[in-house]
Amino acid sequence: MSSAETANTYSLAQRSLTTRKLHGSSHPWWFAAPAIAVMAAFFVVPNALNFVYPFTDWSSFKNTINFVGFSNFADVLADGTVLKALRATLIYAALVAVFQNVFGLALALLFERDTALNRFCRAMFFLPVLISALAVGYIFQALLATGGALNGTLSAITGQQISIAWLGNTSWTIIVVTLIHTWKWVGLTMIIYIAGLKSVSVDVVEAASIDGANRWQTFWRVRFPMIAPAVTFNVATAMIGAMNSFDIVLATTKGGPADSTQVLNVYMFKIFGQGLFAQATVTSLSLFIVVVLIAIPLIAYLRRRENIL
Amino acid sequence: MSGGRSPNGASRRGGWLQPMVALLVTAVFIGAPLWLVLVTSFKPQGEAQRPNLDLPKVWQPIQNYLQVLSEGRILQGLLNSLLVVLPSTILILVLGAMAAWIFARRSGKAASGAYYFVIAGMLLPPAVVTLVLELRWLGLANSQLGLIATYTSMYLPLAVFLMTGFIRLLPIELEEAARIDGANPTRIFFWIILPLLRPVIATATIMVVLFSWSDVFYASFVLGGGERATLPLNLLQVASAQLYQNNWHLVFAYIVLMSLPMVVLFLVAQRQIIAGVTSGAVK
């Protein structure tokens, strides 16, 4: 036994000597170990558990946790609320990705030149990025309530009583909520597009205009293709951010009316609060699967397209 | 930096149009909502009940803000936020820089595998429900330590991503010279690498503080409210409590106070913040 131990120590020593000779000990693994351990413990383990607990009856009403097979999934399909939340999440993410990029790029082009006024306007549009999303939600609740500031202002302008239920329509309030989400984040999208536009060399743009391209052509044919990395980044962050949206929906509509704006995270928050933990994990798992199936392929596609250009 | 005028001279032609449009767009979309917040926070309850853009007929800013400070537990919330955000940020920066150094300098499958293992957290959503379960097992549920662990694991990937990209661009000769002089890895990391990381540390700090300062979702799952509520979680609690129902003057006074630290930080470090947040995005 002692000889085996000696052999073991010897081979360990020898191995560490070999790595030392290569490059190992100049950049030892233990520097990366704490970060890897934190991610394993608090990111990977919960996500692994998230594949187990949807198959249990875990709730605040029982002291034991038992496996129940697919019954939670059957309930979910029969009830339809998670599916509705899934649909709301996808619509929400798609609208935010479009709005944030269209408006972000438009603002970037509007404020592109480095004048004092433009710098001021950029800073103003960046302010909402710094305010908490919950606060943004409350601000827009006050603006858009039926008796709120927007209807009041519209009434004053038109001279008639206007009382549009901006946050109370089952078919288009989700558009209003995604526009609020866009308002909060568009400043970030904008400054990234401005940085992208500035990185395009002036020579290229000048060459295009000497060749007779007008501003419209120069933008779409020359500058826009060259800001592809900024497009990828902005679409990806907008999608991922929108899929994880919570605060703005909670503060404006609480998921209503009739669950029409109830995204997965809001539903998860509600049923977790009711003590239905296993159902909450079903929702959480749905979100995970949606991101894996939609966001990641999309980002991979955008990155590939960057390389072609 | 000169963004340059448009080469075909259009900027001269539209000399007054662009500033007009820029001002109008900013006033309508940013000025009006922020104006609403400010004026409402100065109004008495009766005037604030139906929020509008009018100036207050009766000004009572001091009374509103003092009431929020005394009854809204805002100072407790501020302390709670600092107790979570500061340790999380420091942990993320230190662990992130150490790991990024290894990922940037080591070649081979193990290093790139470990790198992707860590940064996968930038795209994949955290499983918050089972995370709460795990924190209960560890005795960390409903505790600041539990929320620190949550934020650290959530924003560490972003820091590692930014820092690894940054270190890859640093010349390795600096390290090699020190190594020949007999410096060990710990010494090289703390004396040579870490000081060079200052710009990317600034960027990572800004992003992490920005996200964790305004988070209410993860805080509500992990802390479940109560005594330890951070500023935004406290806002969620008080805004739905009796005191604040329809009391927009108090909600908005709270929002102004809560946003102040981030806005002041932005005004002081605007250049670095904008350079920082754009650095990862544009190649």
Image: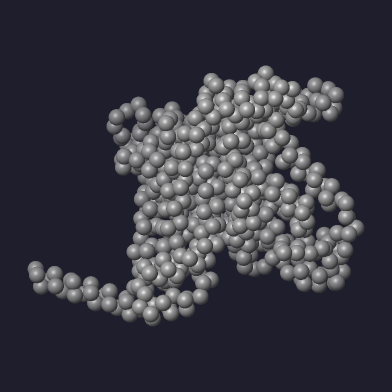
Is B77 above or below relative to B203? above
Of the pair B31 and A146, the residue shown nearer to us: B31
Q: Residue furthest top?
A: B46
Q: Position of residue B84 (x, y in %)?
A: 44, 43
B14 displayed left or right of A288: right
Q: Position of residue B113 (x, y in %)?
A: 42, 64
> Total number of numbered labels?
0
Is A161 above or below relative to B100? above
Q: Quadrant of residue A193?
A: bottom right
Q: Does any portion of residue B209 appear in the rendered image?
A: yes
Check the picture and name the quadrant holding the N terminus of chain A: bottom left
Q: Residue at coordinates 42% horizontally, 58% vertically from top-left?
A: B94
B85 displayed left or right of A231: left
Q: Quadrant of residue A109?
A: bottom right
Q: Residue at coordinates 64% horizontally, 56% vertically from top-left?
A: B271
Q: Does any portion of residue A69 appear in the rendered image?
A: no
Q: Position of residue B160 (x, y in %)?
A: 47, 59
Is B158 above or below relative to A29? above
Q: Position of residue B43 (x, y in %)?
A: 68, 25
Q: Residue at coordinates 66% horizontally, 48% vertically from top-left?
A: A126
Of the pair A188 and A94, the residue shown nearer to us: A188
Of the pair A231 and A75, the residue shown nearer to us: A231
Q: Quadrant of residue B283?
A: bottom right
Check the picture and name the quadrant holding the C terminus of chain A: bottom right
Of the pair A50 and B31, the residue shown nearer to us: B31
Q: Residue at coordinates 72% horizontally, 64% vertically from top-left?
A: B1
